[in-house]
Amino acid sequence: MSVILILLIASISIAALFLFAFLWGVKSGQFEDDYSPSSRILFDDKPASSKKQ
Amino acid sequence: MVKGIATNEQLRCYHCGETCADTLIHTDDKVFCCEGCKMVFHILNQNDLCDYYALNKNPGLNQRIHVRKDKFAFLDDEKLQQQLISFRNENQVHVTFYLPQMHCSSCLYLLENLHRLDDSVISSKVNFTRKEAEIIFQTPQTSLRRIAELLTSIGYEPYISLNDLKQKRPAINKSMVYQLGIAGFCFGNIMLMSFPEYLGIDASEEGLRGIFRWLNFALAIPVLLYSSLPFYESSWKSLRHKFLNIDAPIALAIIITFIRSAWEVLSGTGGGYFDSMTGIVFFMLAGRILQDKTYRQLSFERDYTSYFPIAVSVLTEETEIPTALPDIKPGQTLLIHHEELIPADGILTKGKAFIDYSFVTGESLPVLKEVGELVYAGGKQTGGNIEVLVVKEVAQSYLTKLWNNEGSAGKEKTTVEKNVSFVHLLSRYFTYIVLSIALATAIYWQITDPARLWPAVTSIFIIACPCALLLSNTFTNGNILRILGRNHFFLRNAQTIEDIAKTTHIVFDKTGTLTTNQQQDIRYEGTTLTAYQLQQVAALAASSVHPLSRALASHLSDGKRLKVDGFKETTGKGIEGLVEGDFLKIGSFEYVSGKKNSSAGTAVYVSLENKLAGAFYFQNHYRDFIPVLVRKLKPHYRLSVISGDNETERKNLQQLFGKGTTLLFHQKPEDKLHYIQHLQQQGEKVMMIGDGLNDAVSLKQSDIGVAVAEQTNTFTPSSDAIIEARQLSRLTTFFAICRANRNIVIASFVLSIVYNIIGLFFAVQGNLSPLIAAILMPSSSLSILLITFGTSSLLASRMRL
């Protein structure tokens, strides 16, 4: 019985992890522009400047 | 033939891919069509950004039209800057520009490498769907104006309109996606933990069953309190308007299901129906999101502010001061440059105006205005600079005023009545039936066995909520919107589908809708010209930039170019010159013949060696498919054509449309509006198909306003739908699928009633087991999804959409 409890906790927490990943993804706008990231990875050099940050 | 194509291939501009007339403009082996394109190539070449050309073939856009040097001078204005900049501190500024020219991965590459062109750019990030670039730059080193000019120099001129001065656009509402995510999470886990309920559990493990039930209870709470919020809000809103919409019974069902289930768990009598409840919420939210999916790159809400520039040059004692539009006062003198929009009604005080009212009327041929004449806001000057004395403020000008007052008032009234979908009416009957069944059951159990009253009544509400109706409606609508969008017919929202299906009367605008401004019919009348003489005319016309000359040159030219000497252009009158030794004059009747003008219509006269030969008449070209379209529409709809032009076209239109079509000419925007109101008073459901700002008010007033655009990214007035011009020919097919929408929804609803009857059979007896509920609920939802998606897609493919 205790094994099932551990499994329950594990499964729910993993599911919760994915839920938060999804919510974070929506919040940070990852689903807004589905074109640029896919073409951006094909460019040879990094587009963002490294001078700042 | 093959050879001809091959040579054409070689003569394509390396930058924009347009065919080049000759190889005069080139660097190394690369040919360009104009100096502008060559310039862009040079800038990129110097900065080692030629990957731009490697990613896509001829990725650029034509640079033939030069942007005036001081065009972005207004960006130096502190007050304007404040409105455009999203963030600033001592050493950096963040700004987002809308760049309508963006179209491929090359653009993305170039725009994200802006820092290689200008060191003071820290970073630039492109949002391709919105065609925006967020640029961060160092502030003392460069300025907003310099950034705008940098973008312009590489062919991406930022589009800054008066609209940007207003409040920031509302952020896209993501809350429904969060709600869906949470509902999905809870639904999935509850399903998993309901297995002991469905399959039974060993008596020795009885303690586990309790744990599962309590977990389900806990997981259902976020769905009840957060994910279902849209249903509560919508039903509360409708009840306050004393109207029972579809969300009210659904919200009731959600709450009853939760209370009943919670009571079962608390009293230890059962596991409840948390799985069904969270499941319905999840599916319904998914349907809603599918239906509300909007085309973010399109805007249906545009008003005149999106067309108008943000600032204009005001002349004060010979200096130009860029001034924001709202600050313009009557009495000021504006300097309008080539290709600029006149922002306020005024009197022309200097220069010769060739005003292109295509934004306003759809008519692409410019109108000549002399000093002292009134020019209306919305026209675009082509040709030299002009000065205009403002007589009315921007917001008080003829067009803008019309828009602000009459348009908005008209719409407010109609939207309330318009938005009653048949689905709500259907759900209302459904709710009454369910309520009476519940009442009958309650009375029966009250008499026979009062203990079973509440289980039975609550089960009825759980099983018979009209969620199936909502699901079939949202999924069908969503799919049809998607299918139509794929065919370049974009609808504002799902309600528009139903409105289109109800249309009884279609009103067409003439110019720009029935006719195209991409092409003109040119007809010659007079003494016959030889092929060589025609080439002479073409050569002379090609030397001028006037729109009529350009049209004439491209109409006549055969590719070779004859030599022109002594070319002279008299603005607003005509051109003359020696073509291979022969003296030619083309232009207005007065200019060519020396006598006063007599004829109406757009005509260009030609004389050879000072002898009048004849005239080229320009006429708008009717779209080729109009006769077929009219033939298809006529049996089903009443048709009207309203035009702001004079009656010269009456005969042509009569022929195109045949008898029984109302043709109205000389219609001002108000007249169009009144005509539509008049039709609506007679009980017609009016669809207005138009373009241009002069149709904007009538597009708003009509039951469905359809804006026609040559390309989807051009600007269209606010409307319920946007259609790409060449898709107009398939209008009847689009109508057919909109009408089919209702049948699909009703058919799947009937099916869901069958499920409901099965469920009710158990429910009225008060023994609806969780297992039955758990089978019925997803199977009805899934079969509805399959039917709605399947039939609408099948229909679309049979209609070749």
Image (cartoon, coloured by chain):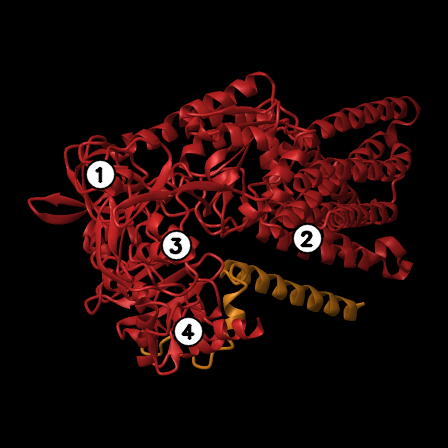
Chain colours: A orange, B red
Are the residues tagged 4 and 1 within 8 Å (C-beta)?
Answer: no
Relative side of B37 to B227, left or right: left
Residue identified by numbered label 1: B594
Q: How many marks?
A: 4
How would you rate the neighbour count of disc 1 (Cα within 10 Å): few for under 14, some for 14-19, many for 20 or more? Answer: few
Measured in 3D between alpha carbons, the distance from the residue under mark 3 to the one under mark 4, in whole angstroms, is: 31 Å
What residue sits 68% from the left and 53% below the top?
B219
Above or below residue B220? Residue B5 is: below
Q: Chain of mark 4?
A: B
Give me the C-alpha separation between circle 3 and circle 1: 22 Å
Q: Earlier in the sequence, mark 4 or mark 1?
A: 4
**How many residues crowd mark 3 within 10 Å: few (<14), some (14–19), many (20+)?**
some
Q: Earlier in the sequence, mark 4 or mark 2?
A: 4
> Which label was assigned to residue B534?
3
Which one is earlier in the sequence, the residue at label 3 or at label 4?
A: 4
Callout 4 amino acid: Tyr
Instruction: Describe the element under mark 2 as helix, strand or loop.
Output: helix
Q: Chain under label 1?
A: B
Q: CA distance from mark 4 to mark 2?
A: 61 Å
Whether the residues at callouts 4 and 2 have beta carbons within 8 Å, the answer is no
- In the depicted view, which residue is nearer to us: B455 or B46? B46
Report, in whole angstroms, how far the alpha carbon at label 1 lies from the one at label 2.
Answer: 89 Å
Left or right: where B35 falls relative to B491: left
Q: Which mark is nearer the camera, 4 or 1? A: 1
